[in-house]
Image (cartoon, rainbow, N blue to C red):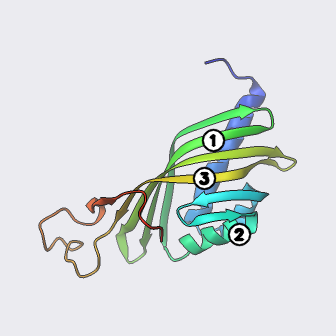
Amino acid sequence: MTGYDIQTLADRAEIADLFTKLGRCLDEHRFDELHELFTEDVVGTTPGGTQTGRDALVGQARRNHEDYDRLTHQFTSVLVEVDGDRATIRAYVTGSFGHAADPRPERVLTGLYRNKVVRTGAGWRISELTVEPKFRVEAPAEGSGERSGEGSGETSGAAAAAVPAAASAR
């Protein structure tokens, strides 16, 4: 690994911050602020489908997240590679989706982000957002008894069986 100059370090920090802001906007239902993170012509491919254009991608994010009172998006293994005014960022995300009435998540998704960003006059912006699903865990259906610890004796809630990544999106 070679050393980084100050500009590259600053670029890497700003690009990593894009993903912190992305998660915060989704978790806190600050969907309008997502516009500040994307280029006008962004292409996004997520478990919710493929969208072209900032407004379409923000609309999809709103539809897929607004019904959940409790959301957390956590990014790990973040790798930023800068090449002039372009960069890539690869990171794993774990998203937990739930409701205020129950502290246990209804759904937990893990995926791999493979994204491209570009330097604009307003700073770094996401130009391609790709989420490759890896794992999906669903809470047991209501009435199964598993959430309350009744039923089969299996572990409840968060230990529900993982469904292959090809499972249909919400």
Dot 3: few (<14), some (14–19), or many (≥20) neighbours within 10 Å?
some
Disc 1 target residue: 89
- Dot 2, crowdedness within 10 Å: few (<14), some or many (≥20)? some
What's the residue type where badge 2 is placed? Ala
The percent coordinates of residue 4 (x first, y second) are: 70, 23
Q: Residue furthest right?
A: 121
Can you say whether 115 is above or below 8 in the image? Answer: below
Cα gap from disc 1 to disc 2, whole angstroms:
22 Å
Q: Report the quarter where the N terminus lies.
A: top right
Query: Relative to 148, is 4 above or below?
Result: above
**Secondary structure of the residue carrying numbered label 3:** strand
- Where on the picture, by quarter, is residue 2? top right
Using the image as rendered, state which of residue 104 and residue 89 is in the foreground: 89
Q: Secondary structure at mark 1?
A: strand
Disc on the earlier residue, 1 or 2: 2
Q: Earlier in the sequence, mark 2 or mark 3?
A: 2
Residue tagged 3: 130
The amino acid sitting under disc 1 is Ile
Q: Is residue 170 left or right of residue 19?
A: left
Q: Nearer the viewer, mark 1 or mark 2?
A: 2
Element assignment for label 2: helix
**Residue behind mark 2:** 56
- From the top left corner, tell me how far across and down residue 138 is, in percent: 35, 66
Mark 3 residue type: Thr
Q: Residue at 58% of width from left, 65% of height from top?
A: 49
